[in-house]
Structures are given as structure tokens and as C-alpha cells.
Image: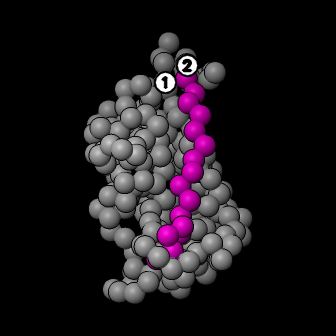
Amino acid sequence: MKKNHRLLIAFSSALALLLALNGCASDDAAPAGPHVRATPEQVMNRCLNTVATQGFGTPTESTLSSWQWKRYVSCKLGGNMWMSQKKVPPDGDALVSIRLASDGSIVSVKLLHSSGNDDLDDAVARAIDAASPLPPAPLALHLSRVDLHFQTARVNPAFLQGGMPAIGGTNAGGGIHDETHWRIKNCNIVGGVGACD
């Protein structure tokens, strides 16, 4: 009996659309201005600061606790999501399965359920590619597979105000919401048939 651990990430509805509402009319990064895309390194630094425990120093990718790793991966993937505002579907839902090596490198990515919108599916694939490699998952999580659930959502433009650069390319301090709902599933797979608790 092969024991497979997987982690289901149901991204809150804000990830895809919040990034699309960054005001950019094209998929091209602007060289300057309020809608400049953050580099993967800027996203990484922002996300590490986001998961830092108050009163302690900023963690590194190799020192993340289990809860920090979960929030960090959500933030890093969300911060690398890019899509033209004009191409965002009103309703979209993509489910992607990622197999991870113990060092955090991505072994495979499989689209389990298309959003029905090629642009959104492509944006999800680009975000995963830009966020790679992920940091090694803490041993306490016992996982080798992560299922990512990306959903679109409507955002109140009043929430997006000027301020410090936010991940996702906006200069609106609340430009992305990286809250994630996590559920760890322990799965046993025998002969291709699996049962999860």
C-alpha cells in the first residue's frame, strides 16, 4: 500500500481577480508607474515579511514553519498571478495539482479542472512557473502533492487605495488577499484507487 499525502489548497476567491483588477489593460509589464509588476524576488521578500512572526526576524524560505509555509506559498503564487483586466472571466475556477520533490522543486503540474477560460488557465500556469521552485515543505506537513484551487472574484474598487506597493502589481496596500483555506488529506492509494480521510 502506497501512502500518499496531499495538501488541498482552496485559494480564496480573490487571487485571480484581485490581480486582474490592477488596472493594467495589457499583459505587458509597464516600465514605471503605479502598475509595475513586482519581480519574483520582490514577491518573495514581500511574502516572507507577510508571514514573519511579530517580535522575531523575517524568516527565510528554509526556516518557515508549517503555517508560515502554507501562507507563504499562497502569497508567492498569488503575487505572481498576472492577467489583463479585460480578459478576466466573471466566474472562473481552475484546479491544478502540483507534485513536489522534497527540495521544493516542482516535479509535475496537472490541470485537473479548467476554468473554461484559456487566459485564466494560462495565468495560473505562469504564476506557478514564476513561483518555482517553492521552498521545501516542512516535514511536519508530510506532503508530496498540493492541489491549488484558483477562483475569480469581484473586488470593491474602494478597497484599492494608494499606498505601499502590494503584491500583484498594484500600488494599493490591500491589492491582494492571500488568505487560504487549507485542509491536509492523508491518502492511501492501492492499485490506482485512493481513499482519503
Residue 148 x, y percent position in the rendering: 54, 47
Image quarter where the C terminus lies is top right
Q: Amino acid at mark 1?
A: Asn
Q: In the displayed image of the protein, which residue is found farthest to the front? A: 55
Q: Earlier in the sequence, mark 2 or mark 1?
A: 1
Question: CB of mark 2 within 8 Å of CB of mark 1?
Answer: yes
Hey, which quadrant is residue 45 in on the image?
bottom left
Residue on which the image places disc 2: 188
Magenta highlight range: 171-186
Residue 13: x and y in percent read: 65, 57
User: Counting other residues with Cα less than 10 Å from the Cα at mark 1, is it few (<14), some (14-19), or many (20 or more)?
Assistant: some
**Residue 64 in the figure: left or right of residue 17:** left
Q: Residue at x 31, y 48 (%)?
A: 58
Looking at the image, residue 43 lies above or below residue 65: below
Task: Please name the residue shown 56% across and 43% down the image.
Answer: 9
Q: Residue at x 68, y 64 (%)?
A: 153
